[in-house]
Image (cartoon, rainbow, N blue to C red):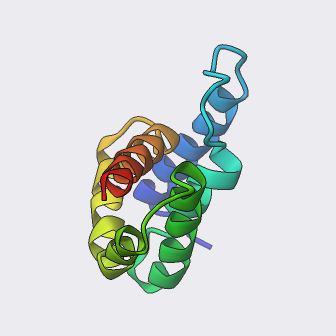
Amino acid sequence: MKITKTQLKKIIKEEMSNVLSENPWRDSNDPLNDEQDIFPVTRALEEWNLDKFEAALLKVIKKLVPNASPQGLSQISRNAGEHQSNLNSAVARSHSVASAGREFITDLAAMVAKL
């Protein structure tokens, strides 16, 4: 099995994020958990994984915005492909998969909360 340089970098970033998320200086008020909330979304960034991405994203949005309107959740679903592409770009530019995912998800949740 061959691993490309890009895949290796992504694996290293995820592992670094896992190690860093175990540190005690992490904000204890943060409702998001890397393993349960962030990584299920960021691990489904391939186009063929859109259904898995959408399900994971909606799950975490509902956790952050429990009273999210059906229209807000519907908007997330309708634009899942675009969200997947945007998050993929953010991860590629970021030093941390977890931090890019966390920022993207919290921004999206804030938008849903306003609807």
The residue closer to the viewer here, 52 or 47, is: 52
Q: Is residue 102 left or right of residue 92?
A: right
Q: Is residue 85 visible in the rendered structure shown here?
A: yes
Residue 43, visible in the rendered structure: no
In this rendering, is residue 24 above or below 18? above
How many marks do you count on the picture?
0
Where 52 sits versus 100, above or below? below
Percent of width and height locating residue 51? 50, 83
Residue ranking furthest to the top: 25
What x and y, as percent, mark residue 36? 70, 53
Q: Is residue 114 above or below residue 15?
A: below
Residue located 27% across and 60% down the image? 86
* Residue located at (52% from left, 42% from top): 98
- The residue depicted at 55 percent of the width and 60 percent of the height is 62
Of residues 99 and 76, which is closer to you in this image? 76
Question: Residue at the spot x=51%, y=53% of the render?
Answer: 65
Residue 106: x and y, percent? 42, 44
Q: Quadrant of the N terminus?
A: bottom right
Q: Is residue 23 left or right of residue 71?
A: right
Of residues 34 and 4, the one nearer the viewer is 34
The quarter of the picture where the C terminus appears is: bottom left
Give the percent coordinates (x, y) of residue 17. 59, 36
Place residue 29 in its image quadrant: top right
